[in-house]
Amino acid sequence: MKWSLLELNKHREIPLEFSEELDVKQTLMARDNQILDVSPAKVNGIITVEKNGYLLHYKLSVVVTVPSSRSLTPVAVPMALSVDETFMTEEQFRGKDELISDEEIIVLDKPTIDLTESVEDNILLAIPLQVLSEEEQQNSELPKGTDWEVISEDDYYEKREKEAEQTMDPRLAKLSELLKDDTE
């Protein structure tokens, strides 16, 4: 769904309300090959037109299916996002207030605001890096197989310390005992 800036300028006094259901499955799967499935995105919000920009506020709910980061089994991740974005034309950006950070502004290169593009970008940004199925969250056991296993970072450092203690040269073991006595 797109709005032209000319159309939006007609809504200077009263914000434009919208309620849409967007099918973003194909484009999201093309942009991120980790995504297995996406439900239709339900979007409700408003666009407010001001002299120094266009404020887009909406609530988004969608379910994205991605592989588990541990076992690669598909996991449905429900998302409920609240998004606020500020759009400006080139002219508005050049004359902007110094109090507004450049990072908070999206400068329009076309005379349109594309809701679908905004929804897609925000969904991609909200996908968590670590995704675990219900079973994996309940079970603290990590996967392992023949001659390999996944261990936590803490277990790895603990294992390294034990190996370092066990592989100490016997000639230096007596020396380390002397150093322990000095510290006490």
Image: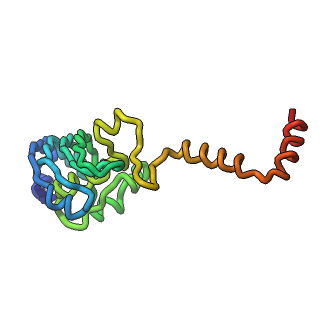
| Residue at 41%, 52% in the rendered image | 101
Q: How is the image coloured?
A: rainbow
| Residue at 41%, 43% in the rendered image | 142
In the rendering, at what x and y percent does residue 68 appear? 30, 48
In the rendering, at what x and y percent does residue 139 appear? 37, 35
Say above or below: 161 vs 107.
Answer: above
Would you identify the image quadrant in which residue 102 lies?
A: bottom left
Of residue 31 and residue 53, the one placed in the foreground of this image is: 31
| Residue at 20%, 60% in the rendered image | 29
In the rendering, at what x and y percent does residue 47 appear? 18, 46
Asked whether residue 25 appears in the rendered view, the answer is: yes
Say above or below: 112 vs 98.
Answer: below
Of residue 3 and residue 38, the one placed in the foreground of this image is: 38
Of residue 51 and residue 141, the one placed in the foreground of this image is: 141
Would you identify the image quadrant in which residue 19 lies?
A: top left
Total tally of numbered discs in the picture: 0
In the rendering, at what x and y percent does residue 49 appear? 20, 48
| Residue at 13%, 59% in the rendered image | 4
Looking at the image, residue 32 sits to the left or right of residue 5; the answer is right
The N terminus lies in quadrant: bottom left
Looking at the image, residue 153 sits to the left or right of residue 2; the answer is right
The C terminus lies in quadrant: top right
Asked whether residue 50 appears in the rendered view, the answer is: no
Of residue 81 and residue 144, the one placed in the foreground of this image is: 144
